[in-house]
Image: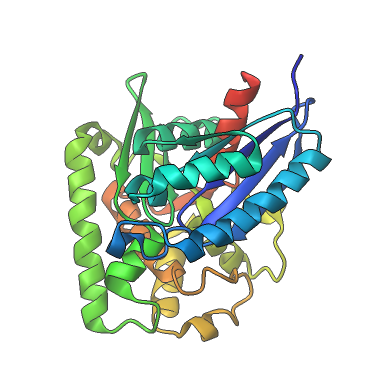
Amino acid sequence: MVESVAALDCGSNSTRLLVVGDDGRVRRREMRITRLGEGVDDTGALTATAMARTYDVLDDYRMIMDHEGVARGLLVATSAVRDASNGRDFLDEAARRTGVAARLLSGREEAAFSYAGAMADLEPDERPTTIVDVGGGSTELAARIGGELVSVSLQLGCVRVTERALGAQPADAEAVAATRLMIGHEVDRAFAEAPSLSRLVGRTRLVGLAGTVATLAQLDAGLTHYDRSVVHHRRLTLASVLYWRDRLASETPTTRLTHPGMVHGREDVLPAGLFVLAAVMARLAVSDLLSSESDILDGVAASLRGA
């Protein structure tokens, strides 16, 4: 018997929930900005305040799961918890509050779940597909090359790059230079670690996942209210990435919030995410990408259902 399942993702910037019914249809998708990774890059630990914010959301999600009759679930944690000395304590409490198993994913596992989720509803393409998942603390790249899933995790995310290099206020030339240097070094390292990714340069379909890309899609469409049918599989050009990257980086977070499509809670970190996205697109020599709202949560839910 196939049961309703829940997938929960505790990321560096947001905490999300996906409930899939016993008929395979999505019952609920929820996202809250919790900034679990705040300060982890500097201190190496999750703060009590960030954990409390996340626990409050997990308590709400448990009530949603009860209402939806969820029988099984899995909570996954990624970059912020991987980097934190008290990550195990967080996972134990998260499991207690949600009543489901809590699992810390490696970067490669994160990429594999994200790839599976994104590929599930994509139209066929003669080119190999590469997914780029720009998170709060890390960015994952994954592609199937020669029948094997090749993935790599970059220590680049919108929160990490903001805290370490770009800053949340209008970026000056020095901050932009530091950001480009940080991202360039890490992209070089990733392609050296997974040299087969170079075979994709100029010949891949790029699919972008997670909040940075989703928010860009909303800005690109000028949405005042979220509409999955507009955002999901929207084509985004490199020109649009560069336009919004440079415009937002020159503005204050308060001004950024005036743009239709900007998500509250991302206004301080989105420019850094767009710097990462632009660098990946440049390295792969692609002029556009597809935004996908199907991602790691869908991959986790499919694994729970045996799909």
In the drawing, does residue 273 fall left or right of residue 210?
Answer: left
- Looking at this view, is 179 or 136 the one in front? 136
- Tell me the quadrant of the picture where the N terminus can be found: top right
In the drawing, does residue 133 fall left or right of residue 15?
Answer: left
In the depicted structure, whether residue 260 falls above or below residue 208: below
The reply to whether residue 125 is in sight is yes
- Looking at this view, is 277 or 13 the one in front? 13
> Residue drawn at (51%, 73%), measured in percent from left and top?
267
Q: Position of residue 159 (x, y in %)?
A: 40, 63
Picture quadrant of residue 40: bottom left
Picture quadrant of residue 160: bottom left
- Tell me the quadrant of the picture where the C terminus can be found: top right
- Looking at this view, is 158 or 5 the one in front? 5
In the drawing, does residue 286 fall left or right of residue 121?
Answer: left
> Residue drawn at (22%, 52%), measured in percent from left and top?
186
In the depicted structure, whether residue 188 falls above or below residue 75: below
The reply to whether residue 123 is in sight is no
Q: How is the image coloured?
A: rainbow
In the depicted structure, whether residue 1 falls above or below residue 152: above
> Residue drawn at (32%, 52%), measured in percent from left and top?
280
Q: How many marks?
A: 0
In the drawing, does residue 120 fall left or right of residue 28?
Answer: left
Q: Position of residue 295 (x, y in %)?
A: 55, 41
Q: Position of residue 111 (x, y in %)?
A: 41, 37
Q: Position of residue 137 (x, y in %)?
A: 38, 55
